[in-house]
Amino acid sequence: MQTARTVRRETTLGLTSAVHRSKALSKAGLLERMFTLAFSGLVYPQIWEDPVVDMAALDLRPDDHVVAIASGSCNILSYLTAAPARVSAVDLNGAHIALGKLKLAALATLTRHEDFLRFFGQAQSRDNVELYDRLIAPRLDPTSRSYWEGRNLSGRRRIELFARNFYRYGLLGRFIGAGHLLGRVLGCDPRVMLKARDMAEQRALFERHLAPVFEKRLVRWLIRQPASLYGLGIPPAQYKALAADSDDGIKAVLHHRLERLACGFDLKQNYFARQAFGRGYAAGPDASVPPYLERGHFETVRERAGRVSYHQSAITAYLASLPAESCDAYVLLDAQDWMNDADLTALWTQITRTARPGARVIFRTAADERLLPGRVPATILDRWRFEAARSRMLGDQDRSSIYGAFHLYVLPGAPA
């Protein structure tokens, strides 16, 4: 049986292969190894890609096989609302695999939407731990159970995070918490955004309370340090691309992304903004939550949960294990921002080999640029059609607002 320590070690080994590009004692090498250390535990309690946009791009069909990077699994379970035949969830991070399997075990045992929403929506009740011990734990595989019942640095079992607002933890949760603390110290409290009654007030509150933080000397210094953005899951190579995305550098890019998150969508309909400014989902029957947590989808997601399988692996290695022409949709998140040209070529070789006619690939990039041309051989990339106009339209609809671009590629040909 794998223990939580073994899972963490495998996570670190996988990240080492994916991220380390430079000599260990160089500045770049030290930054890469700091990132690996930061990323070796739970990173994303919630995924930061909008699954509604994903499903609009993928146009999932009843016989589709979806291969997707799992992250926090909000995407994986939300895709079930579109009824694909099979979803293969892949992630290097063992903590993310354990989180996904916890959600599947909960779906197999919790019959009331109120219990499921309290567990994974509000995620801050002692009742969640009681439900875990009584109902969910016996349905978990030994490795995932070892992870959730293992103890963190505070000495508490990890499952107890669901009694203490799970969304305040993980690398991203702590990064957001640090941002709130820094903002309050500097007189720019992010929670003020929750007072907005409409989008006009969102704009006024942003300009008055959040925009000024970028002029603070401490903030200007912090955002010039690549390690300061590790909490957003941005490795050193991705930081460079992000910084080059504006003539005014990283400050202008971050200002623009935060402005879009705060002002680009009605906060009442944007659970990403609610997480950023309120550190959790809003309560109430009409609150914005990921599709898999919506009351109207609960029975559907429960019924289809058996279509999901989890695999701790690099996505290229997982695809290499599959037969030719066995996949219809690929969700790469922003993983390609981590990759060098050889990695990209290896990945797209396997995507092209395993893709059925009509297959779709979606991904996001930190920078607003075409990632693949000139880096993946034309003999591979020319087989795919980049949907430029549709990609821009879908990117504009992405409520998470933190990426520079959304990309949709389609393999020509009618699905079998």
Image: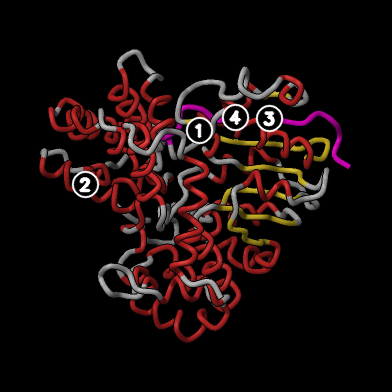
Choose between 57 and 132: the one closer to the eye. Answer: 132
| Element type at mark 2 | helix
In the rendered view, tell whether residue 107 sits above or below residue 363.
below
| Element type at mark 4 | strand
Q: Residues within 10 Å of mark 3 (few under 14, many from 20)?
A: many
- Horizontal side of residue 317 vs 247, given as left or right: right
> Mark on residue 337?
1
| Residue designated by label 4 | 407
| Residue designated by label 3 | 409
* Numbered-mark total: 4
At label 2, the amino acid type is His
At label 4, the amino acid type is His
Magenta range is 401-416
Closest to the camera, between mark 2 and mark 1, is 1
Q: What's the CA distance linking mark 1 and mark 3?
A: 16 Å
Instruction: Please state the horizontal and vertical placement of residue 245, each as a whole percent of the image.
Output: 41, 20
| Residue designated by label 2 | 180
Choose between 57 and 100: the one closer to the eye. Answer: 100
